[in-house]
Amino acid sequence: MVTIASLKKGQRGIIKEFSVDIVPLKLLEMGCLPGNEVALVQTAPFQDPMYLNVNGAHLAIRKETAAQIEIEIIKQ
């Protein structure tokens, strides 16, 4: 399973299905929804948190949360 946590800097992916129970409501409100594009902008020291671009919105999420959101990598 490929997740947001496995993205490398500059990689992009499309969010697939996930359990709403796992993902905080705040992320859903900010556009972290199935079908939306996500790109890894950068990571903090020790790889946590991760700074993402989700459909033009910038947000930081914990690696633990990112590991719960399955994606499909976009080939460049």
Image: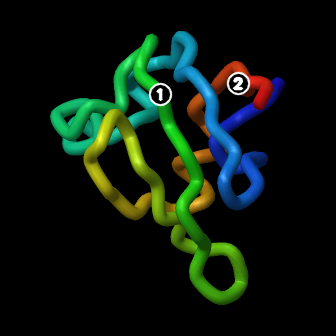
> In which image quadrant can residue 8 be found?
bottom right
| Viewer-side residue, 11 vs 44 | 11
Quarter of the figure with residue 34: top left
Tally of numbered tags: 2
Rendered residue at 73%/26% (across/down): 73
Q: Mark 2 is on which residue type?
A: Ile
Neighbours of disc 1 within 10 Å: few (<14), some (14-19), many (20+): many
The residue lying at 53 percent from left, 22 percent from top is 15
Would you say 43 lies left or right of 54 here? right
The residue under label 1 is which amino acid type? Answer: Glu
Left or right, 42 with reference to 7: left
Q: How is the image coloured?
A: rainbow
Q: Which residue lies under the disc numbered 2?
A: 74
Q: Position of residue 11 (x, y in %)?
A: 69, 45
Q: Is residue 49 left or right of residue 4?
A: left
Q: Mark 1 near mark 2, Cβ–Cβ under 8 Å?
A: yes
Figure quadrant of the N terminus: top right
Between disc 1 and disc 2, whose residue precedes? 1
Above or below 31: residue 51: below
What is the CA distance from the residue labelled 1 to the residue labelled 2?
Answer: 9 Å
Rendered image: mark on residue 37: 1
Q: Residue at x 61, y 59 (%)?
A: 63
